[in-house]
Amino acid sequence: MKLTSLLIAGIFILAGASLRAAEPIKIKLAPAGEDRRYVAMSTLVGADALKPPFVVRDADGGQALPCQWEPAGAGGYRVYWLLPQVAKGQAKMLSVDHGEQAAKGGVTIVEKDGSLAISSGAREITRYNFGGQYEKFKKPYFYPLMVGGTNLCRGFPMDPHPGESNDHPHHTGIWFAHGEVNNVEYWSKEPIKHDKFIVKESGPVMAHLIADNRWGENVIERQDVCIYDIGDDLLMDWAITLTAVGKPVELGKTKEGGFSVRVATELTSPEPGKNAKPAKDRGDGKMVDALGNQDEPPVREHAAPWADNYGVIGGKTVGVALMNHPQSWRYPTNWHVRNYGLFAANAFFVQGSHTLEPGKPITLRYRLYAHGGDPKQAGVQAVYAGYAASETK
């Protein structure tokens, strides 16, 4: 998703409202046939309309919701907020107005030594590692992935822990890469280098990062990421836009690529038929997708809107769900998931190669929901429904 142009399906701006400077902008979220959680919303406020500061109110009782805003060109602003819960069949009428909102916590960004630490209060959520000492890992990546004080990612090779496997040293937390780009291997061999930040903002709703990365002379990758403040769980929305640099680029058919997480050892699974009990560096994790398929072979064999890898770490059931937005290129995605701990959405290894033409970028859109409980307890389908309600224009 290009977050600077994020809108929500079923939202409309009442005719003329945005043109009357003294009047609030009215926004309606249409009802849906299922519960929705964490509906990310935004609207554009023109330069000739309201001026900051802004306040967003839910018409049901006039409650003010945390919001934040960024310049959107031509003197306008884009205002962002998050609806935690919308019940099945419920419509929402909201308003954006000029006014102060009560400060309610939020997300902070602290930069140090080539890393951005993303925190909510005293709790670190994750870090975006992009330069300096992190360049040896070949590409920018997010690590750790914290849920209620528990890291859901394997530490090796960045932060090794006893009992972890040391296979696939190019599996670094949460990352995106591809293994066949004009016959160049950016999955594990050639570096993807951070170029610059376009946006680096934080506030009461989220941390918003837009970063450009360069794949040699072949591709500019733009990562547009929102990291939301939702308590002990973690919610991250991604849009990854790939643009060819000067000449056509062949993105090959390969399993070595995708939007990927290397999960903690406890979330891995034993290999069927090899051991009655997990090996010392394997856990007893489970995988399931939106279609009800379970474990590695069935999940790998089907494209699906989301998949979840869950298990028990330190006596607590936790999991990480990856979700594919309906407007993502090649939705629904296929899944390259492995019992040993790779958990990836891959739009190429089944659907095949693609020639990326100059001036014709593609955008892949994902949500990562790291949660306590199993997928049912965590309401993964409702979180997906909230994500799928988003529309980009």
Image (spheres, rainbow, N blue to C red):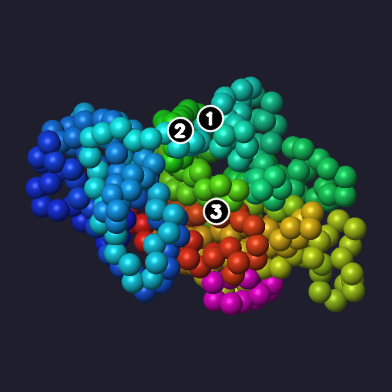
SS for callout 3? strand
Q: CA distance from mark 2 to mark 3?
A: 19 Å
Q: On the image, numbered disc 3 is attached to which residue? A: 368
Residue 116 placement (x, y as % from top left) = 58, 30
Q: Is residue 199 left or right of residue 131?
A: left
Residue 153 placement (x, y as % from top left) = 70, 48
Q: Which comes before the other along the chain, label 2 or label 3?
A: 2
Q: Is residue 89 left or right of residue 338?
A: left
Mark 3 Cα-neighbour bin, 10 Å: few <14, some 14–19, many ≥20: many
Residue in the image at 61% along x and 29% along y: 115
Q: Which mark is residue 138?
A: none
Q: Which comes before the other along the chain, label 2 or label 1?
A: 1
Residue in the image at 33% along x and 44% along y: 64
Q: On the image, numbered disc 2 is attached to which residue? A: 202
Disc 2 residue type (three-letter): Ser
Q: Nearer the viewer, mark 2 or mark 3?
A: 2
Q: CA distance from mark 3 to mark 1?
A: 19 Å
Q: On the image, numbered disc 1 is attached to which residue? A: 109
Range of the magenta residues?
288-298
